[in-house]
Amino acid sequence: MAGISRRYPMLRRSQAMWASRRVWQPRLVFWAGAISIGLISVLFAMLADRAQALFHVVTGGDSGSWRFYLPLVMTPAGFVICAWLAHSFFPGSQGSGIPQAIAARHLRDDEDRGHLLSLRLAAGKVALTVIGLACGGSIGREGPTVQVGASLMLQAARWGGMAQARGLILAGSAAGVAAAFNTPLAGIVFAIEEMGRAYESRTNGLVLTAVILAGLASLGLLGNYTYFGVATGTVAFATDWPLVIACGVIGGGFGALFSLLALRITRRVRRWNGLQPLWRALLVAGICGLAVAAIGLVSGGLTFGTGYAQARGAVEGAPLPAFFFLEKFAAGVLSMVSGIPGGIFAPSLAVGAGLGSTLGLAFGAGTGLAALLGMAGYFAGVVQAPMTAFVIILEMTGNHDNVIALMCAAMLGYGTARLISNEPLYHALSRVFIAEAIRRRRAVEQQG
């Protein structure tokens, strides 16, 4: 071997390079960061499930029991506590978390990124999302997992001395989606379509490696599973295509309406909060929490939490109440504009499943198939990312017989949403965080 090295100096230099700590340290830190994303995503999922179960145990009972009305106190109080903690101790943790990750990719200064992505914020995001679910908020954990994943990967970049901050944020975000849903392909598509509208091919290796390692960590703890079970319905070529079109167009319209309401209310609330940010933010959180509790009581408790159980039931063929999607829609808007940490992925899929279930009854189609199509149309309308919508639903339900139908519903949902609103929700919200970073930077420069 030594003789070969003497004869081929390039090989000798390569061996020395790979033995160098400078080469291996960043890789080891990056791999450890990706694995930790998978492990924390699993822990987050378990805590979220326990929080929802605790809420239902505490508030369980029929309409004649006093415990049935506990949400009228628990939910607004929990929203106020979450809003106060987020404002006072974890600023930047409010809302989904995906806009923060998108904004961080556009910021060039490491200090500015630190206000949106850090280990402190990651811990606060997990804790406050769990508290929000424990008090009945209509929120999800998947968007927060993106911010957590991006935060962990950015911290790994600092520890490992890696310079590719933008690519590592992208990789951490993709790994978060993949581990949260057990959907590796959706994580990659999400990174390309939603997180990086100007995607760079040189980040391919980072994204793929992060998704693989985070996915392996998740699989090691939970095994291979489909998030919403296995859907068995198949679209008939002639009879079911009116349902495909209806789910796409109507779902996209409702998705765009969700985005418009969320953006306009959020902007007005931010302007109104300007004079007294803390007290007015707490007042908004309390009012939204009370409204969410009232909707939950009217719906018989169906709108509390992520909506996972309701969406899974619909996918497996159990019809949802005809107006469930409207109730869940309203609860989702209120939870989002309240300012508490929490995502919209799972609640949006529940709204889409409810819409599809209702349309399926109207068209005389199977509930499971209609729920899938409704989820694709509505989710594509909310996030305006059609590829992510149909890939994530495809992987979450294990149904590969309806690829074209899901693609069609997602594209119709996207096209309808673009006609109503040409402002993608996450990117519009990310500009708020970018503007705050610019104002903060200017204030520091003026003081200096």
Image (spheres, grey):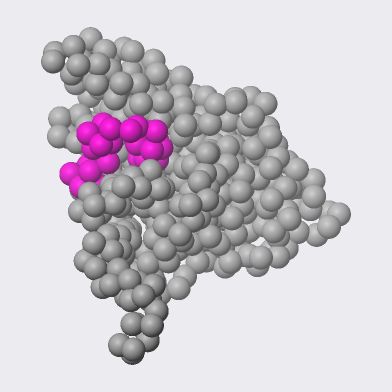
- Determine if residue 322 is in view: no
Farthest right residue in view: 238
Q: Within the image, what quadrant is residue 215 found in?
A: bottom left
Question: Percent x, y for residue 395?
Answer: 55, 62
Q: Residue at x 40, y 18 (%)?
A: 267
For the N terminus, which image quadrant?
Answer: bottom left
User: Who is closer to the viewer here, 16 or 375?
Assistant: 16
What is the count of numbered marks? Answer: 0
Q: Is residue 140 left or right of residue 236?
A: left
Q: Nearer the viewer, residue 212 or 198?
A: 198
Q: Residue furthest front?
A: 7
From the viewer's side, name the closer residue of 447 and 178. Answer: 447
Quarter of the rendering occupied by the C terminus: top left
34 part of magenta stretch? no
The answer to whether 52 is drawn above or below residue 98 in the figure is: below
Q: Position of residue 254 (x, y in %)?
A: 59, 33
Where residue 291 sits in the image (x, y, percent)?
36, 29
Query: Is-magenta flag for residue 101?
Result: yes
Q: Is residue 416 above or below residue 372?
A: above
- Considering the whole magenta stretch, tell me its main secondary structure: helix
Q: Is residue 446 above or below residue 133?
A: above
> Is 320 positioned to the left or the right of 402 in the image?
left
Please identify the quarter of the rendering in which residue 298 is found: top left
Q: Look at the picture and state if 81 lies above or below 49.
A: above
Residue in the picture at 35% in, 21% down: 435
The quarter of the picture where residue 49 lies is bottom left
The picture places residue 294, in percent across and down from the top left corner, at 37, 33
Residue at the spot 52% in from the left edge and 44% down from the top edge: 199
Question: Is 173 on the left or on the right of 47, as rendered?
Answer: right
Q: Is residue 235 visible?
A: yes
Q: Which residues are magenta?
A: 97-122
Seen at 26% across and 27% down, the residue is: 286
